[in-house]
Image: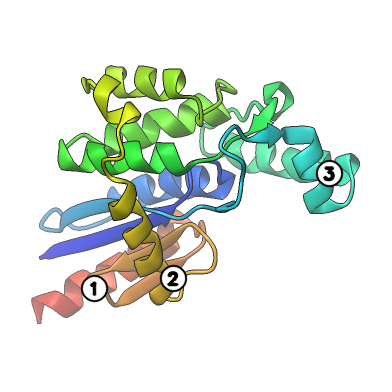
Amino acid sequence: MKLGIDIISDVICPWCFIGKRRFEKALSLLPAEADIVVNWRPFELNPDMPLEGIDRKLYRTRKFGSWERSQALDAQLVEAGAGEGIRFAFDRMERTPNTFEAHRLIWLAGEQGVQEAVVESLFRAYFEKALDVGNREVLGSVAGSAGMDTRDFLKSERGRQEVLAEESWARRQGVQGVPFFLINHSAVISGAQSPEQIAATLNANVTLGAQ
């Protein structure tokens, strides 16, 4: 049974990175006959973010009311991430980036069949290496690690309308937060649920499709 799974996420969403790791664990719990096809779709947490991004401390202080509150939330995420093998580098992050160009790159990676590798590299670049994933040099490096040549692409407008259309599509599906998993355009997993919960939902759809 083939399952088409749309994973709607943003590359600066820490729970999306955690959700990715839990989803990967869930896949190992599925029956061998399950045929999983994954498509990563865009969702900008900050669609009005300046193109150059903003100072992370300033952004987080405005969002959460104080820098101390932001640090407390980061500490909780560090603990959750450690359980999934993620080493969050919040202490080294300087900017909160605009992610539209990163989503454009993910779109192109989907066209070239290397989407999984690029999504993984973007998450690791931002969360574990504290790199600015709104910077085109960083994006070019990520693309290069997946065997892509994006020198002309990053200077072009290619993929722009497609990303905007996919973001509109996500909103029509009722997506208000990420990660959000849409299974065969019907069943939904919202949030970074446990591997067992994710696997149970996927298994139910494998069973349903086999009837």
Query: Percent position (x, y) of residue 30?
Result: 24, 57
Residue type, label 3:
Thr
What residue is pinned by disc 3? 61
Q: Say left or right for 63 vs 122.
A: right
Query: Percent position (x, y) of residue 154?
Result: 33, 28
Q: Which mark sits nearer the N-terminus, 1 or 3?
A: 3
Q: Which mark sits nearer the N-terminus, 3 or 2?
A: 3
Indicate which label's residue lies in the foreground, 1 or 3: 3
In the rendered image, the vertical position of residue 53 relative to residue 150, given as above or below: below
Indicate which label's residue lies in the foreground, 1 or 2: 2
Per the rendering, the mark at residue 205 is 1
The picture quadrant where one finds residue 56 is top right
Question: Observer-nearest residue: 127 or 56?
Answer: 56
Residue type, label 1:
Asn
What's the residue at 47%, 28% (across, down)?
124
Q: Say left or right for 96 vs 156.
A: right
Q: Secondary structure at mark 1?
A: helix
Q: Secondary structure at mark 3?
A: helix
What residue is pinned by disc 2? 171
